[in-house]
Amino acid sequence: MVRLTTIGNFLSGIGLTLLGVTIGVKYLLESLSATPEQMQYPFYIWIGALGILGVVLIISIINTFTEMTGFVHPDDKLLSNMLVYIHALGTLLTFGMLEGIDADEVTQGYLFDMGTMIVIAYIFLFVFVFFGSKIAEGAETGQVKEMTSRFMLVSLVLGVIMAGVYLLMSIIKNTWSYGWASGALFLLAVVLVVVIVFFLGRRYEPVGE
């Protein structure tokens, strides 16, 4: 029997492929001076990717927060949700490249800022995966002041890093076109996700059946 996780991963792959096709078809039609009706084709492809994302999100929620489909290995959950994360961010950013939206700088700005916030939130998780145990050290023995003092320092450093990322992305957005800026943001997100998944994948984690 094919596991639900495998189906979700397969669908995520299809969704990401459709996003790539959406961008490719859009620029191909532009180079061919296509009619306005033909320029809507990328939107229809993007709708397909969006629909698949909805299905994949439901599968991911079921696998992550319930045991309706039985035991799912943590490594499988990690890989599956990595694909969901990349798929969701890609869907958001690709929307800003579609016909009609590509001429609306305000909407593109909103979409890019939303994507940036999603990546920044992941950086927050990234830091706490690496340093969470150190920050919380002593909490179980009631050393709340010690923990809070460490958290203050870490939050300061983390805030500077997150603000720096936002500033960098803002500079890229204002300097380059939306397409190039979105590509840079998407690449940063992929690198962060792959690094943390690779790091956690090498950790031993006891699992139950």
Image (spheres, grey):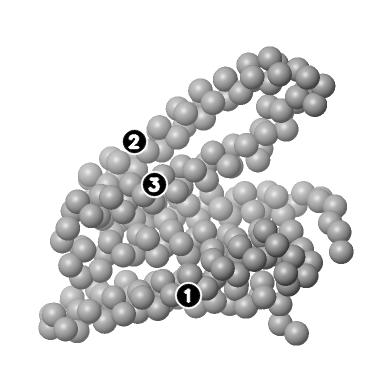
Tell me if residue 100 comes above or below residue 42 in the rendering.
above
Disc number lying in front (1 or 2): 1
Screen quadrant of the N terminus: bottom right
Find disc 3 in the rendering and name its residue: 116
- What residue is at 54 percent from the left and 49 percent from the top? 192
The answer to whether the residue labelled 3 contacts the one labelled 1, judged by CB atoms less than 8 Å apart, is no
Find disc 2 in the rendering and name its residue: 167
The answer to whether the residue labelled 2 contacts the one labelled 3, judged by CB atoms less than 8 Å apart, is no
Position in image of residue 171 (x %, y %): 28, 40
At label 1, which amino acid type do we have?
Answer: Ile
Tell me if residue 63 comes above or below residue 139 in the rendering.
below
N-terminal label among 3 and 1? 1
Tell me if residue 100 comes above or below residue 145 in the rendering.
below
Q: How many marks?
A: 3
Position in image of residue 53 (x %, y %): 48, 70
For label 1, count other residues whose C-alpha is less than 10 Å away and answer few (under 14), some (14-19) or many (20+). Answer: many
Quote the CA–CA distance across marks 2 and 3: 10 Å
- What residue is at 70 percent from the left and 50 percent from the top? 200
Position in image of residue 94 (x %, y %): 34, 64
Position in image of residue 157 (x %, y %): 52, 25
Q: Secondary structure at mark 2?
A: helix
N-terminal label among 2 and 3? 3
User: In the drawing, what numbered circle is on residue 41?
Assistant: none
Q: Which image quadrant is residue 64 in?
A: bottom right
At label 2, which amino acid type do we have?
Answer: Leu
Quote the CA–CA distance across marks 1 and 2: 33 Å
Find disc 1 in the rendering and name its residue: 52
N-terminal label among 1 and 2? 1
Tell me if residue 178 comes above or below residue 133 in the rendering.
below
